[in-house]
Amino acid sequence: MINVTKSYLGNKEKFMAYVDRIYNTGWLTNHGPLVLALEERLKEYLGVKNIILTNNGTIALQIAYRALGITGSAITTPFSFVATTSSLQWEGIRPIFADIDSATWNLDPDQIEARIEHDTTAIVATHVFGNPCAVERIQQIATKHDLKVVYDGAHAFGVRLGGQSVFNWGDISTLSFHATKLFHTIEGGAIVTNDDALAARIRLLCNFGIVDTDVIQGIGINAKLNEFAAAMGLCILDDIEGILEQRAEIGHRYELALADYFELQLPQPDSQRNYSYFPIALASERQLLRSREQLNDNGINPRRYFYPSLDTLEYLQPQVPQPRSRALSRKVLCLPIYPGLPVKVQNRVIQTLIQESIHSEQASRAMFHPLAEAFGLLATPQLSGAACKRIS
Ligand SMILES: *Cc1c(COP(=O)(O)O)cnc(C)c1O
């Protein structure tokens, strides 16, 4: 089976040489030399002021909220991986969803202000599929209402906006280095901030609040990355340019072949993409399910990122429905994209999708014309919450 991604494994001998070093020093974790080396190299590669490595991307979000003193509620996007929302709820912060922009698929800045409540202290937005959010607008709103801004940058490794790292926006950006991500440390993550004092606080939070052997300053948790994980990161970082090039090549082929048939995510102007994912929006959920079945029959396993829309999570009900996110989440399918994906396989993906699309369009024209129009309505962004609920 060809999956949506395949974890990148760098050069094995190089990794083994790092493992030898770990065996020689006996230093396995707690700010070891490989973690420190990886932090230094990432800081330089990404072009950011402070980066603190963590043992996953979810705890990076949780620590970001703690470090910024976020309480009460936070405005967030319903179209993201579940951890963006669940990390808030886990930290006792009520997620308030604001709808997405139907073109960029990111949190729509025009939807934020109306959703702010008396206890709202933050905006938590995702650069979804690596596409930068409307960062200037979001910062304006945050400044006006005295809100903190956290960006879930789990998809945005290496993404640049206006010539600099997208992680330089917001009070904090978090990253995930999970094995399925573009750059990974098997499990891992990071917290980025330009504020040195904040960075120092974050380091304490990541290590039980321990200042040194005899001094504990406030509550903390264990979010430390280990040396084996850092070794994996160092090996992969050596190959990062090739990884990005191969992803871009595959992404461009998909774009050329599929842009006439499917809706694609609108890239933020002046941004440089990383092709961490290749999502397409199909005409309807029915077409998505049919296409997925056809792809499965051809040995290909695309994934529905992100479904369901997070405003439908059972443990958060009742919620104000977010119709654009609900409509989009029913239609988006992420296609296989990773270094080493054979062109032959990619062509099979493209052919299967186009055939199914043409077939279903002909079928709907021939037989279900009024019905197809009704389905077209489903994708209309202006559809009211109540209407959306009725249809679903
Ligand atoms: C992967 C991911 C996370 C969680 O990261 P982990 O390292 O798996 O904990 C958070 N947010 C988004 C958007 C993600 O894609």
Image: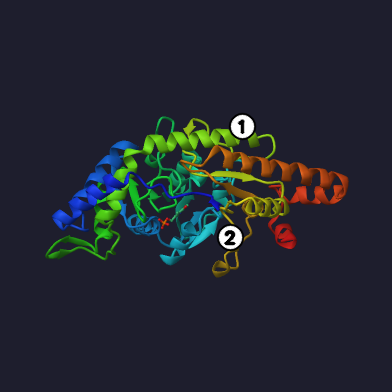
Residue with the most extreme left position: 214
Near mark 2 (Cα within 10 A), the count class, few <14, some 14-19 or many ≥20, is many
Left or right: residue 199 versus residue 215 is right
Left or right: residue 149 versus residue 226 is right
Mark sitting earlier along the chain (2/1): 1
Q: Which residue is mark 1?
A: 256
Quadrant of res 14: top left
**Secondary structure under badge 1?**
helix
Near mark 1 (Cα within 10 A), the count class, few <14, some 14-19 or many ≥20, is few
Please provide percent x and percent y for residue 281.
64, 45
Q: Nearer the viewer, residue 24 or 34?
A: 24
Residue drawn at the location 62% of the way across and 55% of the way down: 322
Please provide percent x and percent y for residue 251.
54, 37
Q: Amino acid at mark 2?
A: Asp
- Image quadrant for the C terminus? bottom right
Please provide percent x and percent y for residue 209.
23, 62
* Eye-nearest disc, 2 or 1: 1
Q: Which residue is mark 2?
A: 311
Please provide percent x and percent y for residue 170.
40, 44
Q: Quadrant of ligand 1?
A: bottom left
**Alpha carbon separation for disc pair 2 and 1:** 33 Å
255 w.r.t. 368: above or below: above
